[in-house]
Image (spheres, helix red, strand yellow):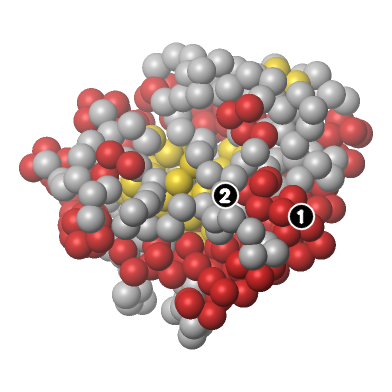
Amino acid sequence: MHPGGDALTSLSATILGVAGTELTVEEAALFKEARPFGFILFARNIETPDQVRALCDSLRKAAGHEAPILIDQEGGRVQRLRGPVWREWLPPLEQVQLAGSRAEDAMYARYRIIAHELLELGVDSNCAPLVDIATRQTHPFLKNRCYGHSADTVAKVGRAVANGLLDGGVLPIVKHIPGHGRAQVDSHLDLPVVETDFETLSDTDFRPFAALNDLPMGMTAHLVYTACDTRPATTSPEMMRVIRDRIGFDGLIMTDDISMKALKGDLAELSRQSLAAGCDVVLHCNGEFDEMTAVAGASGSLEGDARRRADAALAARKGPAEVDIPALEAKLTELLHGRGNV
């Protein structure tokens, strides 16, 4: 599925969405010219297994390389593959709490099954683990997507999630680096501002990301840490230095969706600012053709360290280990005490 030898020369520093369930002529032409590093799928792109497989094939054909294809398949509210065709999942925090001391095993099994579902469709990257720490103030858009309330728990469960995906042949994307748990507003709609001091952030929010700093890809948080900068992390060179030097993350960093309302301004300029700050790739999700064209035009090509990190991420794609899915489902049910939905 992932033949070697893809040259990253001339790939644009973008990951793009598409509007519907199949490529339009205009989209195919744009992707042929721009050659995005990758693509991301949403519910609007998904109808049947055969249709998703065909869409993935056409995306890679248009881009001219074995582009990683991403999805948000966390479970709970954030899952693009849904029943009755695909499995429905509890919110992550609910499953962790239900599994108790067996949470790491349960979350490994969950994401190993998710990886199996994704890879059957040609989707080979999942926007997980989410290692933001839940607090009493965490906004509801995020809270039950978290894995716990302490850095140690979140880091351990996050590692289990990443291992489940990797063993299934799916690249994990750790998010939202350097931490989104203190956000009290929804960054899809507004810009969160966190006024916590740097020492506290280092001892809490940053720690799970430092524990997982060997993962191949990460996604930024659209929020301001006033202890570091007045700019959002995605466009802040100061925050990128924290991510690279303090957290020690040397994987490919993509922006969170550049079109989210937390960021204000022209998308082309925001793309340039993100890359200048130190992001490697700009993520644009909504499939709006004119916006994609502007983002691709502003983002340029993968070069230097960004190319090295992109190359390393692609090299991390491995074939899935053998797995007995019915046996793994039975184990997961047992880990969750035989109660309710997986």
Question: Which quadrant holds residue 288?
Answer: top left
* Residue on which disc 1 sits: 155
Where is residue 84? Give x, y as percent: 34, 54
Residue 228 in sight: no
Report the number of numbered marks.
2
Question: Of the residues shown, which amino acid type is indicated by label 2?
Answer: Leu
Residue 219 in sight: yes
Tag of residue 211: none
Question: Of the residues shown, which amino acid type is indicated by label 1?
Answer: Ala
| Disc 1: CA contacts within 10 A as few (<14), some (14-19) or many (>=20) | many
Q: Which residue is drawn at 33% across and 42% down?
A: 43
Q: Which of marks 2 and 1 is in front?
A: 2
Q: Is mark 2 on a helix, strand or loop?
A: loop
In the rendered image, the quadrant that contains the N terminus is bottom left
Q: Which residue is drawn at 58% across and 29% down?
A: 141
In the rendered image, the quadrant that contains the C terminus is bottom right
Tell me if 240 is positioned left or right of 53 in this view: right
Disc 2/disc 1 C-alpha distance (Å): 20 Å
* Residue on which disc 2 sits: 90
